[in-house]
Image (spheres, rainbow, N blue to C red):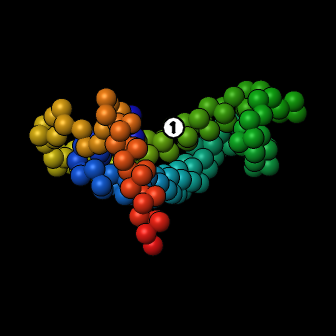
Amino acid sequence: MIKGITSNMTPLCLEPEDIGLAIGMLGSIRTDLSSIATAVYTAILSEKLTTNIPKYTGAVVATTGMSEQTLEEILTGLAAGQESFPDINPTEVAEVASEYQTAYAKSFQILYLVSLAFSVISVIAAIFTPDLKHRFTNEAARRLHGADINKKEAEAFNGEHENKGAV
């Protein structure tokens, strides 16, 4: 949605000769900012998961008495999408899986707050968007068709050939 709004509003903010440059810059800036946001989100999520998974799943080891090796096997399997563990007590697997989900939920809570910061920046940028009512006119910067377009194209074509012959 944001991409559509910015792509449609950019031509209204600029003179016709600057539209191509502005759309190119818009694409570059959008790519750069999304790369930065992805790096920030990935770094925060990775750090929080590294902290939260042992914090929440470690309690299961203490309450059930399972070994660290069994916990590691379950966590590795859960990370890979494995749903069943034939050699491990299903109750223990369910408890670890529940705490694993809790660890992910707690990690994503921080990402929600980070996304709010990005949203505040977007709202501030929207506040400073100029009023474009003066651009909504019936004036066309360049006509692409019309009753006399063929005549104008022929004149332009003949003028180019005459200039080339004179050189």
Check disc 1: other Cα within 10 Å, few if <14, some if 14-19, many if 20+: few
Secondary element at tag 1:
helix
Place of residue 76 in the rendered image (x, y in percent of width and height, measured from the top left): 75, 45
Mark 1, residue position: 105
Place of residue 16 in the rendered image (x, y in percent of width and height, measured from the top left): 28, 50
Q: Which image quarter holds the N terminus? A: top left
Outermost residue, right side:
87
- Residue under the image location 39 percent in, 43 percent down: 153
Place of residue 125 in the rendered image (x, y in percent of width and height, measured from the top left): 23, 49
Q: Which image quarter holds the C terminus? A: bottom left
Near-viewer residue (38 or 144): 144
Near-viewer residue (164 or 98): 164
Horizontal side, residue 101 vs residue 12: left or right: right
- Number of marks in picture: 1
- Residue 66 visible here: no
Place of residue 29 in the rendered image (x, y in percent of width and height, measured from the top left): 40, 57
- Residue under the image location 29 percent in, 42 percent down: 142
Q: Amino acid at mark 1?
A: Ala
Horizontal side, residue 125 vs residue 101: left or right: left
Does 96 sit above or below residue 167?
above
Near-viewer residue (121 or 29): 29
Near-viewer residue (94 or 104): 104
- Residue 126 visible here: yes
